[in-house]
Image (tube, rainbow, N blue to C red):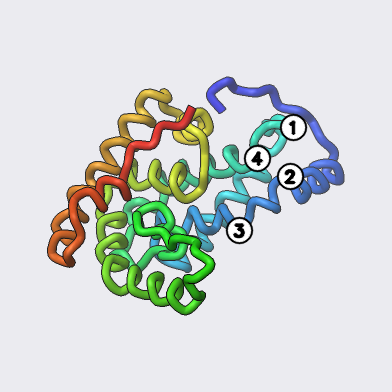
Amino acid sequence: MSDSPERVKLSKEEKDRRFQAELMPVLDPLYNFAYRLTLDEDDANDLVQETYLKAYRFFEYFEPGTNAKAWLFRILKNSFINDFRKKSKQPAKVDYSEVEGYYNPDEVEGDADIGASSSDMRQQSTRDLIGDEVASALNSLPVDFRTVIILCDLEGFTYEEMAKVLDIPIGTVRSRLHRARNFLKEKLEKYASSMGYGNDDVNSAVTDDEQE
């Protein structure tokens, strides 16, 4: 972190024990982050491996009790910016099951009368109608904007945590997130209109929902 924590000397046994206990549980979300950045399974695996190698090398600088996920995400983000951005490939697809919860305004009502089949049909319809458009819009974002969407709307980081991961002021986090969501809204409004949805649907789907 920018505070430059002091290095704490550890025996190999203690280092290995703490590394396993504190950092390895973050493996799955770390891979998900890497995949959403690289949009390629092989690159995501390489990026995660590089992140853990760097984390192990500098583990003595990790402060016990602090946010291990944010620490690893920052290492991965820096590795991506420095080593993987030039290798970025064409977009594949995003995880619709996570994206639609935020960008799909038409949530299932939760009525006891509505059956599971209706819910399944709605979800499938969402994927068919706006899935490709959402994926294209997300993947077309500049990496700085795409990253804040991923961290906030998919990974659930607070603004404070995002500022630490990205090493930028909270005000910049808010600005990037606002601009990224507006970009998505503009991209999706034309498509929503062509499919018979109103602008109010899109506006409620992509909001600048401030976190305290």
Label 4, label 2: how far apart the Cα atoms are: 7 Å
- Position in image of residue 209 (x %, y %): 38, 36
Q: Secondary structure at mark 4?
A: helix
The residue wearing badge 1 is 64
Label 2, label 1: how far apart the Cα atoms are: 9 Å
Residue 15 versus residue 66: which sits nearer the camera?
66
Position of residue 90 relative to residue 169, above or below, is below
Amino acid beneath label 4: Ala
Residue at horizontal 51 percent and vertical 28 percent from the top: 160
The residue wearing badge 4 is 68
- Nearest to N terminus: mark 2 or mark 3: 2
Residue 191 versus residue 174: which sits nearer the camera?
191
Label 3, label 4: how far apart the Cα atoms are: 13 Å
Label 4, label 1: how far apart the Cα atoms are: 8 Å
Tag 4 near tag 2, CB within 8 Å: yes
Residue at horizontal 44 percent and vertical 60 percent from the top: 109
The residue wearing badge 2 is 22
